Image (spheres, grey):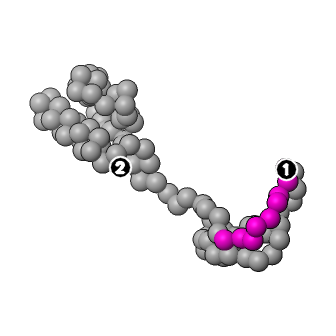
């Protein structure tokens, strides 16, 4: 029977071992998501090799999905100042500002 729904699971420290990957594919997982915001390339490479090895052994095509990190908002350069809790500040687009109670965000779009 053909399924219209695909089962995708995130592979990580608790599921990134041969036996678990084998069982997941055997039970119907169609793809594995790897979150590239966490971990190291060496670990990701090991997971990819295990998924490929198991999928070959079980003769089942399995997708690998790389979830890359999106833009991370940082603040730009601002003058030394004290901002207290619950105090209102202004956010502006730009690399830096000399205005007090103003925080620059060095991106063009949010």
Which element is circle 1 on?
A: loop
The residue singled out by tag 2 in the image is: 66
Query: Looking at the image, which is closer to me, 22 or 8?
Result: 22
Q: Residue 57's spot in the image, x, y percent?
A: 11, 30
Q: Quadrant of the C terminus?
A: bottom right
Q: Residue 95: x, y in percent?
A: 64, 75
Principal SS element in the magenta part?
Answer: loop
| Disc number lying in front (2 or 1) | 1
Q: Secondary structure at mark 2?
A: strand
- Residue nearest the observer in this picture, 81 or 86: 81
Q: Quadrant location of residue 103? A: bottom right
| Residue 66 falls left or right of residue 80 | left
Tell me where residue 34 appears, x and y as whole percent. Answer: 36, 43
Note whether residue 17 is visible. yes
The percent position of residue 8, horizontal first and vertical second, equals: 37, 36
User: Which label sits on residue 61?
Assistant: none
Can residue 35 be seen here? no
Boundaries of the magenta span: 77-85
Q: Is residue 81 magenta?
A: yes
Tell me how far mark 2 sits from mark 1, CA to CA: 39 Å
Residue at 82% x, 60% y is 82
Toward the viewer: 6 or 32?
32
CB within 8 Å, label 2 to label 1: no
Q: Earlier in the sequence, mark 2 or mark 1?
A: 2
Within the image, what quadrant is residue 48 found in?
top left
110 or 56, which lies in front? 110
Can you identify the residue that label 1 sits on? 85
Report the residue at 62% width, 71% height from top.
106
Residue reaching furthest front? 80
Q: Is residue 25 magenta?
A: no
């Amino acid at each position: 029977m053909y399924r219209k729904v695909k089962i995708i699971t995130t592979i990580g420290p608790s599921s990134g071992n041969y036996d678990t990957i084998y069982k997941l594919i055997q039970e119907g997982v169609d793809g594995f998501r790897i979150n590239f915001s966490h971990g190291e390339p060496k670990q990701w490479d090991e997971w990819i090799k295990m998924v490929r090895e198991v999928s070959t052994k079980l003769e089942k095509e399995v997708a690998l999905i790389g979830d890359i990190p999106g833009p991370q908002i940082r603040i730009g350069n601002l003058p030394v100042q004290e901002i207290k809790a619950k105090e209102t500040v202004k956010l502006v687009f730009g690399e830096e500002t000399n205005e007090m109670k103003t925080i620059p965000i060095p991106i063009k779009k949010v």
